[in-house]
Amino acid sequence: MKVSLAGIELVNPVIAASGTFGYGIEFEEIVSLERLGAFVTKGISLEPMAGNTAPRIIQTAAGMLNAIGLQNVGVVEFIQKKLPPMKRYPACKVIVNVFGYTVGDYIEVISRLNEAEGIAAYELNVSCPNVHAGGMTFGTDPGSLEYLVHRAKNAAKRPLIVKLSPNVTSVAHMAQIAASAGADAVSLVNTFLGMAIDASTRHPRLSNITGGLSGPAIKPIALRMVYEAARAVKIPVIGLGGIITPEDAVEFLLAGAAAVQVGTASFADPRAAERIAKGLESWCKSHSVERVASLTGALEIPRS
């Protein structure tokens, strides 16, 4: 079940996604953290962020809309209080999601994280649709993305993963830009920009008006985008978007992903990532797959 991701060895390819698994340690009483390949922290910013006002999460027919707004404790408190307890679980790699309003913010957060112990990699958040500056502002503009990734890569002392937005014309092109600017891997997709309206009150259901759509509803689109990105770049691709079952994870691997992230499923089942990791191992055994890494990009397209 071991896989190599941008030079990092994971015990399996299942990663708990950013924004759905807190700072990791909150789950230690209900999840066997050592059975996860890794988890990605909430987006960490230079200063603490309170996030958007409630309501911030709305259930949809096949998933949810969220407009949390990257609420977090800030990089200083994260390093001092949130990161140290994860040393109890060395097998579960810690990937820190990094957010900034400006390029300078991103670089400063990375510079401070460089001095901390227990971090395996950074995930550059250039795709959050729920803030009014930064995030998706960088991820949807080719020039801005290239400049930010280049600067971040020069600053980072650890592997740099770039989390891409699906709210673009061509995610494959953005993956190529990230790769050419120095990214060690890309993760995709983040949420799709959407909204919900209360017909009775005629008000938006989210205080932010719009939010990010995630869950099973986006899986077919996310799968297609991972397939396109994996064919466009040589660096590893991490696939996410609506993964609920072990078979969902297999589909993303076959499409070209080297690893997968489990996000929205954790809201309904906090043990989802662990369950999927265990189920993926069982699936490999029942299908005579000796190495889970062999599934990456193994999609077979029948000839007509």
Image: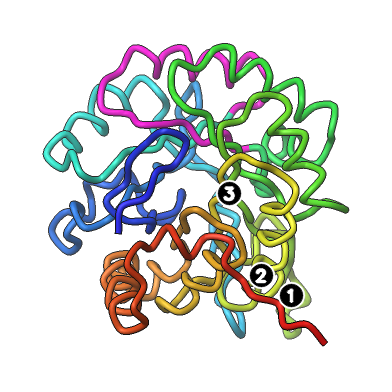
- The disc, 2 or 3, on the residue closer to the chain's N-terminal end is 2
Q: Evaluate if marks 2 and 3 touch, with contact meaning CB atoms under 8 Å apart.
A: no
Residue under the image location 57 percent in, 67 percent down: 298
Above or below — where is 180 with respect to 1? above
Q: Quadrant of the C terminus?
A: bottom right
- Badge 3 marks a residue whose secondary structure is strand
The residue lying furthest to the right in this view is: 169
Q: Is residue 58 left or right of residue 115?
A: right
Q: Is residue 101 shown in magenta?
A: yes
User: In this figure, which residue is indicated by the disc labeled 3?
Assistant: 237
Q: CA distance from mark 1 to mark 2?
A: 5 Å
Residue shown at the point (46%, 49%) measured from the top left: 18
Image quarter for residue 271? Answer: bottom left
In the rendering, which numbered label is found on residue 205?
Answer: 2
Give the amino acid type for the residue marked by disc 2 in the picture: Arg
Q: State the CA–CA distance, disc 2 to disc 3.
A: 34 Å
Dot 1 amino acid type: Ile
Using the image, determine if residue 31 lies above or below residue 80: below
Q: Provide the residue span drawn in magenta.
A: 100-125
Q: Nearer the viewer, residue 184 or 44?
A: 184
Q: Which residue is labeled 1 in the image? A: 197
